[in-house]
Image (tube, rainbow, N blue to C red):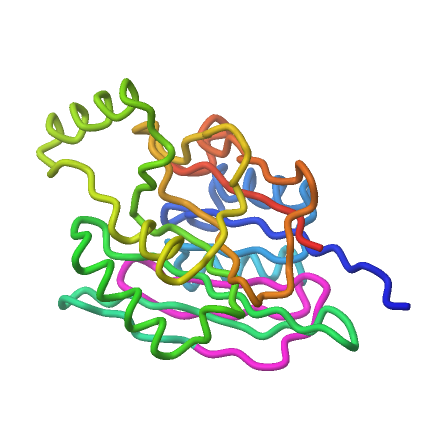
């Protein structure tokens, strides 16, 4: 009989964190305390990623550079069978995805992709999703990172009014839902936060950082394991950090 394998996953946009700073030291302490099996980082420069790998000593450290400082995956305990990167640039700005197939047991591999989508344009984000979908088997993947996209289901009418007002005050267009709607409905991803109370991941009381898993990814969240770490309050980043344990 095969025993269950539990894999913890933490994701964080680290906001161009720099080695040798208090923010960096707080991040290292957090990662050591939470002790996740897999760490997905966005907006992480190559020097910071190398320094984190030195401090944490993962089995594998995988990195894809980008203009917004790149994306990385640290596998703390499980070997990586295959990995690569994708160029998802839409405009002149370079955006990337890093992905990995990770062996968690003799019978089971999981597939993870860490991404950071375009910040200001929902149409461009949809184009980036289509680029990724052409290269990766969405059904079998866990998608994680900063999607810069909103889920309509997160907001009741009062919260939606506040969100719309704040966006207008910041000179931004009204909220759109194309990307997350497409991932959930058209591509069949499941939100690891499903069934949990809404917790924002940004200073603007919105959620743009997600952990999605495909319908054939061979993972399920452990009951009540999903949480959002208050890394804004810890003065580590301008994003909070989603965390889940899969089985």
- Residue 164: percent from left, percent from top: 18, 28
Q: Nearer the viewer, residue 190 or 57?
A: 190
- Residue 117: percent from left, percent from top: 30, 57
Q: Residue at x 53, y 35 (%)?
A: 228
Q: Nearer the viewer, residue 20 or 200?
A: 200
Query: In this image, 236 relative to 126: left or right?
Result: right
Q: Residue furthest top?
A: 158
Q: Residue furthest left?
A: 171
Query: In this image, 117 relative to 80: left or right?
Result: left
Q: Nearer the viewer, residue 38 or 246?
A: 246
- Residue 63: percent from left, percent from top: 46, 69
Number of dots carrying numbers: 0
Is residue 171 covered in magenta? no
Q: Quadrant of the C terminus?
A: bottom right
Query: In this image, 105 relative to 18: left or right?
Result: right
Q: Quadrant of residue 30?
A: top right
Is residue 78 covered in magenta? yes
Q: Nearer the viewer, residue 23 or 239?
A: 239
Over which residues does the magenta segment extend? 58-84
Q: Residue at x 24, y 67 (%)?
A: 94
Is 113 drawn above or below residue 189 in the view shown? below
Q: Quadrant of the N terminus?
A: bottom right
Q: Residue at x 63, y 72 (%)?
A: 102
Is 221 drawn above or below residue 102 in the view shown? above
Q: Residue furthest right?
A: 1
- Residue 244: percent from left, percent from top: 61, 46
């Amino acid at each position: 009989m095969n025993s269950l394998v539990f894999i913890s996953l933490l994701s964080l946009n680290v906001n161009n964190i720099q080695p040798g700073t208090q923010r960096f030291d707080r991040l290292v302490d957090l990662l050591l305390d939470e002790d996740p099996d897999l760490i997905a980082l966005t907006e992480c420069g190559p020097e910071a990623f190398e320094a984190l790998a030195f401090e944490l000593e993962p089995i594998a450290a995988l990195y894809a550079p980008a203009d917004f400082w790149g994306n990385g995956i640290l596998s703390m305990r499980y070997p990586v069978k295959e990995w690569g990167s994708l160029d998802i640039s839409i405009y002149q700005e370079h955006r990337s995805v890093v992905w990995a197939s990770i062996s968690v047991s003799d019978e089971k591999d999981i597939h993870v992709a860490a991404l950071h989508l375009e910040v200001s344009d929902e149409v461009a984000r949809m184009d980036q999703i289509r680029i990724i979908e052409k290269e990766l088997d969405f059904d079998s993947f866990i998608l994680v990172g900063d999607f810069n996209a909103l889920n309509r289901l997160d907001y009741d009418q009062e919260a939606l009014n506040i969100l719309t007002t704040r966006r207008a005050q910041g000179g931004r267009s009204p909220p759109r839902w194309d990307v997350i709607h497409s991932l959930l409905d058209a591509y069949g991803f499941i939100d690891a936060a499903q069934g949990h109370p809404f917790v924002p991941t940004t200073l603007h009381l919105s959620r743009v950082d997600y952990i999605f898993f495909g319908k054939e990814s061979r993972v399920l969240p452990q009951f009540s394991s999903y949480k959002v770490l208050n890394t804004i309050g810890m003065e580590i980043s301008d994003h909070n950090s989603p965390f889940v344990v899969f089985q």
